Image (spheres, grey):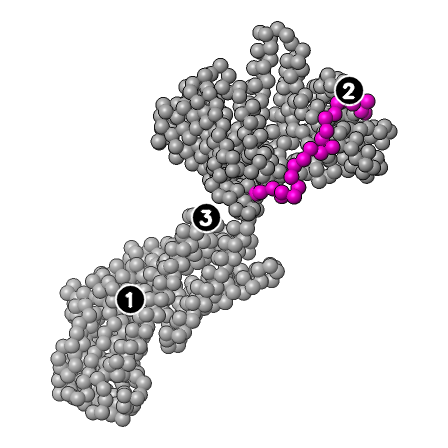
Amino acid sequence: MKSTGQVFDLTNNNYYNDFPSVINDGWLFFPNEFYTSKQINSLKNLRGYKINANETWHNLNKAGIIESNTGYATYYTRIKVGEENPRLVIKFPKIYCAAKFYVNGDLYTSVGVVSNKKSSYKPALKTVFIELDPQKSKTFDIVIHVANFDHFEGGIISPPIIGAYNYLLNINNKILITDAVILGSFLVSAIIFFFIYFMGNLGYEFISFSIFSLFFAIQYSIYKSDIFSSFFQGINYYLNIKIGVLSVMLTFSSFFVYTYYIFPKYLNRNIALVISLVLLLFGITGVIIPAYHVTMILPAFFLGFVPVITLYLFYVFSKTVIFNERKKLLSSLAAFSLLLLSIYFLNNEFHFFTSNIFIDGLIFFLFLGIHIFLLMYKYSVRIKQLYIAVEESARAKNEFISTMSHELRTPLNGIMGMASMLKTNETDPNKLNKVESIIQNTERLTSIIDDILNLSDLESGKIQLKYNKLNIREIINKSVELTNHFRKDKSIDLDILIDPNIDEILVGDELRIKQIFVHFISNAFKFTQKGKVVISGKLMKNNDNIQEIEFSISDTGQGISKEKLNDLFNRFKQADGSHARKHGGIGLGLALAQQLISLMGGSVSVKSEVNKGSTFTFSILLRKADKTSSVKENTVFRKIELDPSLKLLVAEDNPVNQKLMLMMLKNLGYTADIAENGKVAVEKALTRSYDIIFMDIQMPEMDGLEATRQILKNISDRPVIIAVTANATDRDRDECLEVGMNDFVSKPVKPLEIKECILKWQGLRSFLNENKIAI
């Protein structure tokens, strides 16, 4: 291609094969005149200047070609093409501020309204494509009338390009697609980090980057891409300019805030605040002042303020690289991303080099990828911190519940124990009823404490099922015995119907199954005044190893309304939650039962009708017992009598519980020694050979666990050590057994439990001694 004066000679270019050509140098420029191509070619002594098409009016003003950056003018050039060419197109990027395009004297298209007076012109922004058909003409006179009264730079922004129609439009579509992907990436990032911030209650770096991404996408669509002008062709030019400058300032301001929250130790908070406010003030000023002044201060901002911001942020990132070993990579990536962003903004304003799809895409995706990585790193750190905080909170809650349980059980042990002793010795019916009321209410309070502990352990995953051989019929009978006081003075018949196909001996967690039955049976008795309660068990599945059993507990009580059924298994919810309810409880029983059933691989359901009764149905999976080791009466558990010669030691720090244990043991025919703490218990165990030691856990100077370790370490003929403690959870039981204790009794202690423990270990000790086996 060669340019002679105002002629671009492209006759040797074959655009079937050649890349597009830039037609920039050699245009004629006529200031303050609107000429046609005919006038330009026929009139003599026209005052025209040879310029580059993309020369801004600001530069032409400095060169003395025009007197002002505003006004009107004519651009002219002639293009010659060869006949053997495809359909061609000339691409004109945005022109400030209004333009008319003529081809061979005919008006081709307009952008805005062109006039030689500001009052009658209307600015607009749009990329223009002019089609040329080499088959109709080989020479094309291109005339552009431009009017600019609102832009400091003015004129054609980028050099015009000519090439094959299909090729250039294909390139343009690729640019639009790339721009859409870039815009979409930033907008999606804005939305994602917006929701991450508000849903996760995370740091301000997430919301500030979300704001940055949003305003970056807005300013990019206005200044860099044709997407905004394509989709919003009717938008007011002045609004476009003001939205653009505001979005640019907010982009920088939010990025500065974001940087502060990413590296708060190294970026001065006051400096960050001042710079952000200055940028925000710039943006607000841009909205208020005329568009011409906006376009005048924007280059000054990029030339003066952006380098200062960039240098300061590089200084901040350099400090993080030097002083923060853990975040060297993060700081380096942040500095590199800042360099990319600065290159984009400065080149977008001053056109240091011609950008293309690849360069733009690389810059933005590298930048976005780096900061997504930075934020996701921060997010992972924050999630880890939250996880630790949740674990710490759960641990503190469990410790509180455990401590609360211990502190409540300790006085309850004294109350129930003394009441039990009174009951044993009392013959007056009136006094006996009062004592029984004390015992029943103490048991009820103990049951509530147990439910709270068990639910806490279930939630934290600390309850593990303990599988032992069990008899499901005996469990039901024991559960009925434990809940019989709820049907005292009521006319309630009880039927127990168990499928004969259910094995006599199965394997499961007897304690937990009993808990489930107690909750359901006690509710049936509590809420039924007269009628019948039916407990049934039906074999649902039977294979070589597992039996699935469906149990149901039906009553003819008051029933539950449909609207209350949904809340029935929620914690602290009751079917009757009014102040006038007849029955106590805190609404944990059914929630606990449901979770235990779920732990056993089963499910629970309920059917109920008001004033007709309720039926609770649940299923559990139980393993079949090993038939080769069926339960037989063992010599260990043969019937024996209490041996009053046993030497007993009670390690207990609470004076009331000391007195209680001595009274219980005295009633059984024993005298016992007292140790007021673990240290004394060890000393006494070393000086006297005890058969059984009842060991409290929480004691001053030395706790029961450490005392047990010391006794087992230093005594060859070890005694039976039974934990008697207010620490009543499964993990407490396991902890006691792990250090070498033989048994576990939780407070409040009942005389019968103490007696059974002594008989059990007295018989076992006798059997082991007879067979010369160590405990």
Q: Quadrant of the N terminus?
A: bottom left
Asked which secondary structure carries label 3, the reply is: helix
Q: Is residue 747 left or right of residue 617?
A: right
Which quadrant holds residue 186? Answer: bottom left
State whether residue 340 is above or below residue 439: below
Which badge, 2 or 3, comes first in the chain's sequence? Answer: 3
Marking on residue 289: none
Q: Give how far across and how far down residue 11 sits, in percent.
A: 24, 92
Q: Residues within 10 Å of mark 3 (few under 14, many from 20)?
A: some
Q: Give how far across and how far down residue 201 sits, in percent.
A: 46, 47
Residue at 73%, 19% in the rendered image: 668
Does residue 54 appear in the picture of this structure? Answer: no
| Segment colored magenta | 623-647
Q: Nearer the viewer, mark 2 or mark 1?
A: 2
Determine the CA span between mark 3 and mark 1: 33 Å
Determine the CA span between mark 2 and mark 1: 95 Å
Contact between labelled residues 1 and 2, with CB atoms less than 8 Å apart: no
Which quadrant holds residue 166? Answer: bottom left
Q: Nearer the viewer, mark 3 or mark 1?
A: 3
Asked which secondary structure carries label 2, the reply is: loop
Number of labels in the image equals 3
Contact between labelled residues 1 and 3, with CB atoms less than 8 Å apart: no
Contact between labelled residues 3 and 2, with CB atoms less than 8 Å apart: no
Name the one closer to the observer, 290 or 552: 552
> What's the amino acid at mark 3?
Gly
| Residue labelled with disc 2 | 670
> What's the amino acid at mark 1?
Ile
| Residue labelled with disc 3 | 200
